[in-house]
Amino acid sequence: MGREAKQQDRAADRLRWKCRRGLLELDIVLERYLQQNPEDDELSGLLDLPDNDLWDIVSGRSEQYETRFKEVVARLRAA
């Protein structure tokens, strides 16, 4: 396995780890999302939000997020 492949694997592992949350609902949505979008770099920034804020965004109860996340939020809501 080449160096670049190892770096991609580590990045994917970090993203999967960051997707582990304290809310079961988020875990389910994020797990499904990662199956469809395993290398989504945009997701990482959104995962810095607290669980409850992130769930409100994903569930459509809140539109309080940076516009740069608009596309990833739409994909999460569709997952």
Image (spheres, rainbow, N blue to C red):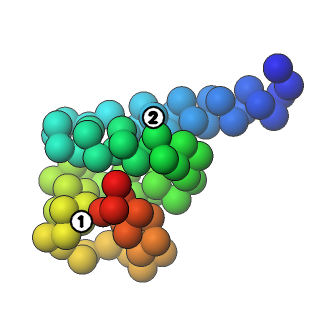
Q: Which residue is drawn at 19% across and 69% down?
A: 60
Question: Could you say where residue 72 lies in the image, as x and y percent from the top left?
Answer: 44, 64
Query: Residues under labels 1 and 2: Cα distance?
Result: 19 Å
The label on residue 77 is: none
Is 55 positioned to the left or the right of 43 in the image?
A: left
Res. 63 image quadrant: bottom left
- First reached walking from the N terminus: tag 1 or tag 2: 2
Q: Residue at x 24, y 65 (%)?
A: 57
Question: Is residue 74 shown above or below 34?
Answer: below
Question: Depth check: 77 or 17 in front?
Answer: 77
Disc 1 designates what residue?
A: 57
Q: Quadrant of residue 46?
A: bottom left
Identity of the amino acid at label 2? Arg
Q: Circle 1: is it few (<14), some (14-19), or many (20+) Cα within 10 Å?
A: some
The amino acid at mark 1 is: Ile
Looking at this view, name the residue that lies furthest to the right.
Answer: 2
- The quarter of the picture where residue 25 lies is top left
